[in-house]
Amino acid sequence: MQAPVALRERGRFAALLNSVLQAARRRTQWREPDARNLRTWRQVLLGVLVTRSTRLLRLGQAVLPERQASRAKTAALGLGYFLAQADFPIAGFSHRLLLAIVRALPAERLTQYRGRVLVVIDPTEYPKRSRGRGKRNRQMQYIGRVRRKANGQPKATPRRRATSGQPKPAAAKPATTFGYVDVWAGLVLTGKQFLPLARQVFSSAHPKLPSQPAVEDAVLDRSLTMARALKLPSIAVGDRGLGRKERLIALARREQDFVFRIDADITGLSGPDQVPGLLADLLERQPWLGETVWDGGDSGPTRCRVRAARATIRFSRTGRQADVTEASLNFVELVPLDPDRDSLVLATTLPAGTLAACKGVAWVYSQRWSIETAFETMKAWGLERFMVRSWRAIDRLLWIVALAYALVVLALHDQRLARLREQARSLLWHLTVLGRHLTPGKLAEALGLDLLSHRRAWTAVWLH
């Protein structure tokens, strides 16, 4: 009988976390958490890594020996108390660790365009089965409304192609259910991998959160500030729904480069006389620059014709003329040769006067798919299946998932863990579950399989 493969480099993986902690401690304004809380945090982090779950009972089963509890439920109660009550500065602590993880990454692993890294932002929804108010008033705190899922995916507003002279059809309002929105932002790595930098949970029922756009601005500003702290010039990238005129103008006036997908049914001013008109009409009057292939993620490569225009957009919150802000932007449109596919319209501060430049803008936007693959992996880890009730516990648990994912991504690229990756491939190949590449999800699966046979060894190197 063939002997099982073991991850004998598990000590180096634990040392990787220690090196990240030590690097964060050397920075100014570091606040050392209480030793007992830090130990519990390490236990929860290990539990998320090896169980790929956010259910407290499963986490309690994973760390039961170290909790010195007789039952997994008792250990789960202790972890729940840490998440909901302990004095632990999770947001600042997590930001400093994520900065240390980026500093530990080899520079060549960062995806760049024209010498700038890509910071992608996107919200995701966590639908929850809740009536909003439990029988004993123990429902999830500040639970709001999110889009209802259909067949495992959020129900989106029907897409449409903007055409000249035709009124915009009324969009069907998607059904909603109880849940939370979580806004994430981070760096794009080679191979379309994602490394989180900032995140914040949002609920329409929270009394101190003004709006989801305000939360999105806060998360984006935080991630861009972190990129500047790392001395990394950046390009912000976002999908349709994030490209609000107010946000685009604010970024352009701060000289922050960006590529956002937008709808073409907005008003723009073009020409020497700044004549107002629909952006869709302005783009239709532009000559074709050529053809390219648009990588549409799940939709696959699509052959498109390309055209571009430059226009000025304006925004006024009060409607008064003195309150108007404006910015001149480039707009790139990719029109699929397939008439059943919708066109892609991008607003950007990057050059877009030639076919090569437009291809570059479209390539930058295609890198946004990295955050979608990260969501898919983390949701398989239980990102949206948490059952804790308090707002603080929810936020802390989501931060721990973000750090667990970032640590696995670092392990995939760190040169010191090359033997660990080889051992993980051998273990997964031995079980015939290895795909073409070792992904963050597959590496985490290997860690969990190894823990089943070597729990004492993992406990010794991880928690001591």
Image (tube, grey):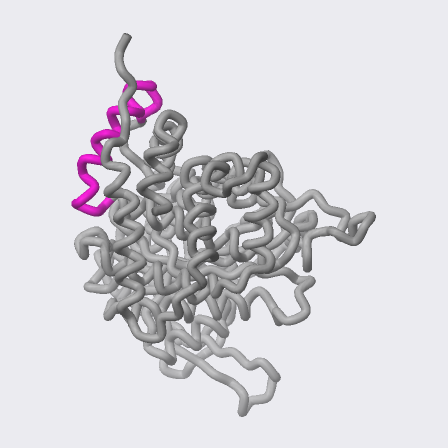
Image point (51%, 41%), residue name: 68
Q: Quadrant of residue 269?
A: bottom left
Image point (43%, 76%), residue name: 249
Front position in the image: 253 or 186: 186
**Where are the magenta residues, as a range?**
413-434
Count all numbered tags in the image, as a single digit.
Answer: 0
Q: Residue furthest bottom?
A: 322
Q: Quadrant of residue 206?
A: bottom right
Residue 228 lies, with reference to residue 440, above or below; the image says below
Secondary structure of the magenta portion, mostly?
helix
Image point (59%, 59%), residue name: 85
Front position in the image: 68 or 60: 68
Residue 191 lies, with reference to residue 219, above or below; the image says above
- Please state the horizontal and vertical placement of residue 298, each as a whole percent of the image: 42, 38
Q: Quadrant of residue 422?
A: top left
- Please state the horizontal and vertical placement of residue 301, each as a whole percent of the image: 34, 39
Is 126 inside the magenta-drawn segment? no
- Please state the horizontal and vertical placement of residue 46, each as a whole percent of the image: 41, 43
Q: On the picture, is 58 further left or further right than 441? A: right
Q: Residue furthest top?
A: 1
Front position in the image: 331 or 92: 92
Image quarter in which the N terminus is found: top left
